[in-house]
Image (tube, grey):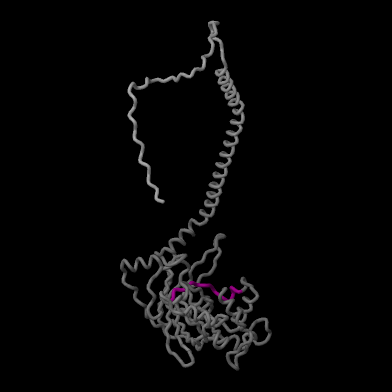
Amino acid sequence: MRSLRLSLVSLGVFGLCTASDVPELSDCAYFSGKDHDSEACQRPLDAVTTLAPGSFYVAKVACIDCPSKVDVEKRGNATRPKAQTEYDMLFNVTLSHDRKVLLLDDAPVFPAPPPHYILTSQIRPNFTRSGLADLSICLRYGQRDGCSAFVVSRIRLDYSYSCKHTDSLPEAIEQWEITFDAIGTTTGPEDTPWLFNSSSQQMLKVMVQGKTLEDPRYPGDVMEKDSPSFFGSYEDEPEPQYELEIMSVELVERSYTFPQPPPSTVWTKIRHFFGSDPAPADGHIVYLAEEWGYSGKKGTLKDMAGTFWLDWGYIIKAVLPGLIGGLIGAYLLYRLCLLVMREWELWRWNGMDAVWEQIRQERENEDEEGLLYHDEPGGSASPPPRYTDEVHANKPLPSKPLPEKPLPAVPLIDT
């Protein structure tokens, strides 16, 4: 209901008319006390209702053989069984506030490609203009519980999407044709999809016109960034932006044109694993929920990482902080042990200093005693040796004189 609430409230649908004989939407509300019971307000909603020309449309698409999911209380547990009931799908086609993006149920579908799933509302076939007014007021004041009386359920669609550039008009105006065909539904990656194969079902066709906006950059930035260099331009050219306007919204017959998947090769498998599949031809995209996981397309690295984080993320969040805290605590304990051991060594050596000082003193005393004269133990003292000029030599002198060694020549000095 979020997308419907945002669109109906943000664009101010309460003072708009679609035709002179149709009352304003606010007058069809139950609490308005005006035209709530009038025939114009109580008749079923048209296939396409214009609420704001050029910016806001509501389309009701009859969904043939579409399932609906109704909450049923069973033994205290809420279940969602599938009921084979034909309900209509309610689409709101709007523009963003800056008029640069086309939205379908608040999901951007142009100029960027649409997301891999879109949620839409299911309504009863007799849904009236008065019901639309009451739903908008209900969502405006945030009464979600009471709003379930107007919307049967919300379904996730498998769809075929195409975008074609149709024409280029003067004054930098472009036109595109966008088609949206709901081809099935599922509630999640594990559910069996329901296919909408009826040929009587119609698809949505939106004609969009866009006027090219000027480059928002300053002239100096444009000259600096667009100036060529040795390696080419500094950056790629920005994508052109358009001020969009919805020209028409209508329901047309289904095209049943689905592009064939590319041939499976080693290179395509590698590209698919890293999430870089080739772009679809002619802007035609088919989204099937069974091909997508919770985080991306199945078989890709992104989906595997997302699934791993979804399954083990809470364990990692619980274990990783404890592991990091344990490592930090162990390191602090190690540093504390080193500090204690160092202090103990210092204390031990402070006690050993006195021991070493005593040993050193005793050794010095022994050395001093060795230098003093002592009598022999026999009692007879011998005088100290006298000093003489005789040279004590270990070897006798040679008997023959040594040969004279000639002196080196006196070097000549230049004057």
Of the pair 97 and 129, the residue shown nearer to us: 97
Residue 132 percent location from the top left of the image: 59, 81
The number of numbered discs placed on residues in the rendered structure image is 0
Residue 75 position (above or below residue 383): below
Does the magenta portion include 149? Answer: yes
Of the pair 346 and 407, the residue shown nearer to us: 407
Residue 229 percent location from the top left of the image: 43, 76
**Residue 36 appears in view:** no
**Residue 293 appears in view:** yes
Of the pair 151 and 285, the residue shown nearer to us: 285
Q: Which residues are magenta?
A: 147-159
Q: In the drawing, does residue 383 fall left or right of residue 395?
A: right
Residue 328 position (above or below residue 38): above
Furthest residue in direction top, as rendered: 379
Residue 347 percent location from the top left of the image: 61, 32
Furthest residue in direction front, as rendered: 415
Residue 136 percent location from the top left of the image: 61, 79
Residue depicted at x 57% and y 37%: 342
**Quadrant of residue 228 within the rendered picture:** bottom left
Of the pair 232 and 389, the residue shown nearer to us: 389
**Quadrant of residue 270 within the rendered picture:** bottom left
Q: In the drawing, does residue 31 fall left or right of residue 295?
A: right
Quadrant that contains the N terminus: bottom right
Residue depicted at x 41% and y 79%: 283
